[in-house]
Image (spheres, coloured by chain):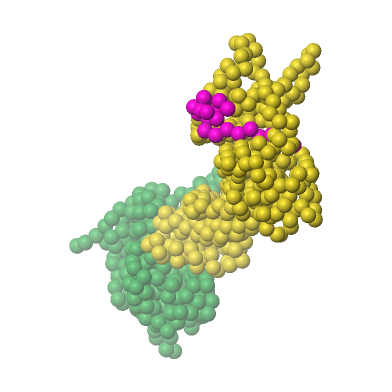
Chain colours: A yellow, B green
Amino acid sequence: MSIWTTLKLAFRALWRNKVRSTLTMLGIIFGIGTVIAMIASGQGAREAVADVFRSMGTNLLIVTNGSVSTGGAAGGQGSRYSLTWKDLEQLENGEVPTVRWVTPVLQSKVQVASEDANWNTTVLGVKPSYFLIKSWAAKEGALFDDEAASNTGPKVAVIGSTVATQLYGTADPVGQAIRINGQPYEVIALLETKGQSGMGQDQDDTVIVPLKTYLQKMDRGIGKYISKGQLFVSVGSEKEIEHAEAQLTAFLRANHNLGPNDDDDFRIRNLAEFAMSQQASTERISTLLAIVAAMSLIVGGIGVMNIMLVSVIERTREIGIRMAVGAKPIDVMTQFLVEALVLAAVGGVLGIGFGAVLAKYMASYYGWKLFFPAATAAIAFAVSGGVGVVFGLYPAIRASQLDPIVALRYET
Amino acid sequence: MSAPLIEMRGIHRTYVMGDNLVHALRGVDLVIEQGASIAIMGQSGSGKSTMMNLMGCLDQPTQGTYSLNGKDVSRLTRPQLADVRGKMIGFVFQSFNLLSRTSALENVEMPLMYQGISGRERHKRAMYALERVNLADRAHHHSSQLSGGQQQRVAIARALVGEAPIIMADEPTGNLDSKTSYEVMAILQGLVDQGITVVLVTHEPDIAAYARRVIVLRDGLMVEDRQQAPVRAETQVAS
């Protein structure tokens, strides 16, 4: 029998039992739909996490002061000043070749104010390379460069979008006056919105001023050590990060005159590691969800098998007639298998649509990018076809093995 | 002379029913020539249904040989048997056995699907078969919209459509009133006149009377084999 005739027969047989066919298909629709939605949203979530870390910089090493232990009681991180301005200068001069950019990041919580509002936020004192390291651009205005940083003219500040909203509402903050710790500054740029960091901090709740200004106005001027701060060190690419970490460690140990038995008096944190563990947990959750969704697809497949078994019994007489007029066992098997396949495939197509809608809804609800790669849809379609074959095979084989004499005598 | 159409030698058929062996046929020899009109009679349990199943290649003998058109068909696989059925044999059943919710035309086309004949050709041949049973005007009616006699004529058209040389009719009038029975028998007799071999399986002497040859089975053995002048059904239709 031609494929076309077989398909036509299958569609007609399914059409005769519309309600039953639809209900059976629902199992497949929900199964495929949830699998698609879970895979798509898993990918969306993974990308969202990756984005967060990309915004923090995965090729970033953060160097902090080490801890001091006095009489056996360990002080906290940064309790021992060890990083020096000389370390910074040498790094800036390229003494560690893998280091591309470096900036100190000094920070303190202070009160800032506009004419009509005030806000408590984190003020950072950085070198201009900070913006390169964080790949953070200005949305309005221009960021400060080395000139502005060393400028003795009016003090300047760059603000994050959260601070802008708190202080100026919807008005353009660029050119406005801002008081930081009571001192007047001019807002020269509004930063692009970055959102939450991987640790859940609002990265936009910040005011950034040139390092020099910070040291003069917030700190007590330059001493030997970089206190209350850390170094952000950017490496050319993520791949070099481990190599860079080793180089940096060796460089700092030498600079600080540490002997081979001394512990490091600084600490280097690697964001890539943190990103990876975060990524892994996202992946675990989305795998789990996909497994649950796959279970529901299997349940849908069992529904197909169930209905096909009922159908074979109901149509025993028909099978007998077909065999009597010359249908071979393989013809009967093909007929029932194709029916199961059509059920599953139509369910699969509708399921892909359902999954796409679901994925879209979830993406917009959670603010993810919508991922719906064609490959996923193609795989889903193949899987639903596979479900049809796997769960349709047993009923089809049963049908094909009926004895025509018994089947012809079967009373429905 | 060519081989006879049907040649059965020493046919035994034994079933296992639980712990018992049932000997449905216990050594039957039967030769039927092309174009014959034959009635197989017997009480229920005589083995006539078994005989029809064997002759119709729905079943195979436990012992003995069956050649159909000179070819031994007693030891074939299921697919081979299906192929022989499709090409050689048309069935007409007591309960019509049409597919429900399917038009007369599609019912008649069905056997051709399994011979890989194209849709257009199927349609043409099925229409021709329906014309032969005077039902061309009912081609698109569903079986439920047809009377019993019409349904049986559709079944005859289905048996004819593959140009099979043999038609096996199992109690073809068992579910019909006498007037409709005459019509159906007249059609079957007409087919004999056209050279088709018609095998009637019945327990009714009235129906056997339409055949030229009658064989009687009892307890799995052939006890009678006679020739007779058949009653013509079309004279009864007219009366």
In magenta, the rendered stretch is A89-108
In the image shown, does A329 or B62 lie closer to the viewer?
A329
Quarter of the picture holding the N terminus of chain B: bottom left
In the image shown, does A405 or A245 lie closer to the viewer?
A245
What is the residue that sits farthest to the front in this orientation? A153
Residue at 39% from the left image edge and 86% from the top image edge? B235
Answer whether residue B45 is visible to the viewer in this image.
Answer: no
Left or right for A328, reference A43: left
Vertically, is A120 above or below A336? above
Left or right for A368, reference B23: right
In the image shown, does B228 or B154 lie closer to the viewer?
B154
Is A92 covered by the magenta stretch?
yes
Residue at 46% from the left image edge and 79% from the top image edge? B140
What is the residue that sits farthest to the bottom in this orientation? B239
Count of number-bearing discs: 0
Quarter of the picture holding the C terminus of chain B: bottom left
Answer whether residue A323 is visible to the viewer in this image.
Answer: yes
The x, y position of residue A21, in whole percent, is 58, 63
Vertically, is B228 above or below B235? above
The x, y position of residue B75, in whole percent, is 35, 49
The x, y position of residue A28, in whole percent, is 58, 55
Is A385 covered by the magenta stretch?
no
Vertically, is B76 above or below B138? above
Residue at 34% from the left image edge and 68% from the top image edge? B118
Residue at 58% from the left image edge and 67% from the top image edge? A18
Vertically, is A56 above or below A251? below
The x, y position of residue A106, in whole percent, is 69, 34
Left or right for A230, reference A47: right
